[in-house]
Image (cartoon, coloured by chain):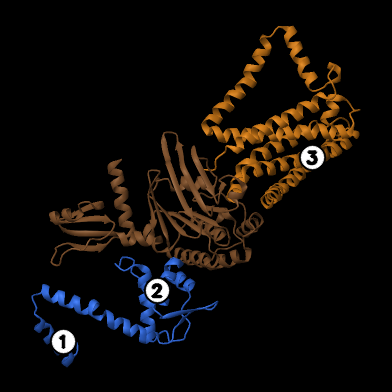
Chain colours: A brown, B orange, C blue
Amino acid sequence: MEAIELKNVTKRYGGVTALDGVSLTLEAGKIYGLLGRNGAGKSTLLGVLSNRIFADGGTAFINGNPVGSSAAQDLLFCVGEANYYRPACRVKDLFFWAGKFYAGFDETLAEEIAGKFRLDVNRRFKSLSTGYRSICKLTLALALRIPYLVFDEPVLGLDANSRELFYTLLLGSYAKNGGTVVLATHLIEEVASLLEEVVLIDHGKILLQRSAESLRESGYCVAGPEQEVDRYCAGKHVVGEDRLGGLKLAYCLGGREPVPAGSPLQFSQMSLQKLFVKLTEREAENG
Amino acid sequence: MKKRNAAILYEFRVSFPYLLLFYAIQYGVVAALWLLARGVMGLSEGRLFGTLELCSMIFLAVAGAQGFTEDFKMLMQNGVPRGTIFLANLALFASFSAVMALIDTVVLRALGQNSVAEPLTWALYGREFPSAANWLWLFLLYCSVSMSFYAATLACHKIGRVWSFCAGGVLLALLLIGLPVTVGMLPAEGRERLALFFLRLFGIPAAGGSPLAPFALFLGLSLLWSACAFGLLRRTELR
Amino acid sequence: MQLDLLSEKPIFQQIAGQIEDAVFTGGLAEGSRAPSTNELAALLGINPHTVLKGMNLLVEEGILEKKRGMGMYVAQGAVEAIRRKRQAQFYRQYVRPLLEEAAKLNMSRADVAALLEKEEKHGSD
């Protein structure tokens, strides 16, 4: 099967459970957003997928190959937050080595992309600024054709121009070569329009997995007098509430029910970010 | 296959310059000291350099420790499986050991002829020790040294910095205080037996040791450390 | 081209609407090549599948047509098709909301009609 499949994956660090029985299927050919707050378990999940860390329990497969097998490792490339490249290497040497390790790496394309980012390929990795180290890592990933490309907080420390350029290049390469992209981030608004499917993770558990389009359509806010709002919300999936004076705002997920003409209720769309914040807030209250 | 070849190529490209640098420095120092001794101080007799092999061992120890820390990250980032990383490291250490054993055998025996230096094997087994055996003896010794430090670095990484320092401290204390004290407490007969055991382990002919003993010892140690390193590396996380 | 992620309208419908506008106002002439999915996706920072969904909507309505291996083109008669569609939607999209709002403001039909007449005479003020 062309997919990443996790079954009941658990990972503990001492007394902290970073991943708590995560089961997840990421089908090939989509751009996924793995969204979660800091410490939600995003990085741990990607670490398990890229075989950098080991799960304490459960199984993980990439296209049917167990994670850790060389077949699985040839299918996935992970750009993490930490820098693992040899600090003394020049950027162009890193390109050279990527070409040696990956059949799908295009050195000429890498030089081209580096030019667009104004990344000096003759600099040593350790002499680059934090932002340019990120750019260097992103360049290495963008010039690589591989079925699964996984990014952990890719744009942290990048200026607006570089972020824009990264998203444009990523979409261009995705449109041209296909493949599967996973963007793990807490900067939800920024990636929202790129995503085809959204996976929300919190406290090491998957809160929900939905297509971005359906989430956008099904999340809404209803505002009005408290009693009216409560009456409307009865039996609906309410993810959060706010109060503004006498006005009550309820955040709902699901189909919108038509209200009779003259109803004091007002409806508005809820952004992915708002939905996410409300969902994780509630989780914190319950937990 | 691509990953394996690339990993081995990477190991050699990155580490080989250090080997050249090491020998350049070592023989630069040797030449300078020789000139100083012969030319300036006018000494014309006597051995100047005892155990240049020890320098090689220190180099290999550093290489063994370094082999993990930096290369592991770089190779992991490039999707090389842990088994392949181990293989590449093993290939590097074995090649380094082979090349260094060859250089040390040839050069030190040549210098030995002029009494400038003395090969370690001559000091232990006498001048009749054959050159091929000399190479193999050094090769296996170097392998066991580099692999032991490689395994030790992996173990340190596994148990963390604090416990590594504790373990190192305890080990050092045992070696520097515990061992002499224990030996000192042994009866004379026991001490003699212990000495004899070690002499035989290294195959010293005067102690009645088998000439094959040191080869078996170094080979056994190399295999043991390799197995330890492999077992540790397979369970090492990249964080 | 401007998209509103917070609009009630799904993004793919917004994209379809924008292209349709461009065709209707003559920015994209009948028979000319429509922007490719990938160009639009990269330009707007939108998932290519979403863009494609929007363009397919226009293909279904006969405004765009696929040419094998050459991408999407604006169909002949697209402008007329859009006009017919918009005429059909005119009541629901403009007249009904107008009357609903008028009702909330306690304005009679006659008031609305008078306003329309005034608009016709003097233009907007």
Q: Is residue B157 above or below residue A237?
A: above
Count how many numbered circles sit on residues in the image: 3
User: Residue C116's mark?
Assistant: 1
Instruction: Work out whether residue C39 or residue B16 is closer to the camera in this orientation and state it.
Output: C39
- Please give the name of the residue rendered at 79% of the width and 26% of the height, measured from the top-left corner: B216
Q: On what subunit does the disc labeled 3 rest?
A: B
For the residues beneath circles 1 and 3, the answer to whether they share a chain is no
Q: CA distance from mark 2 to mark 1?
A: 34 Å
Looking at the rendered image, the quarter that the C terminus of chain A falls into is top left
For the residues beneath circles 2 and 1, the answer to whether they share a chain is yes
- Please give the name of the residue rendered at 46% of the width and 51% of the height, measured from the top-left corner: A25
Quadrant of res B210: top right
Instruction: Work out whether residue A119 or residue C53 is closer to the camera in this orientation and state it.
Output: C53
The amino acid beneath tag 3 is: Ala
x, y percent for residue B121: 84, 29
User: Residue B120's mark?
Assistant: none
The residue pinned by badge 3 equals: B98
The residue pinned by badge 2 equals: C57
Q: CA distance from mark 3 to mark 2?
A: 69 Å
Q: Secondary structure at mark 2?
A: helix
**1 or 3: mark nearer the eye:** 1
The amino acid beneath tag 2 is: Leu
Q: Residues within 10 Å of mark 2 (few under 14, many from 20)?
A: some
Asked if residue B32 can be seen in this view, the reply is no
Q: Secondary structure at mark 3?
A: helix
**Dot placed on the residue nearer the N-terminal end, 2 or 1:** 2
Q: CA distance from mark 1 to mark 3?
A: 98 Å
Q: Is residue A278 above or below residue A195?
A: above
x, y percent for residue A181: 49, 58
Q: Secondary structure at mark 1?
A: helix
x, y percent for residue B141: 76, 32
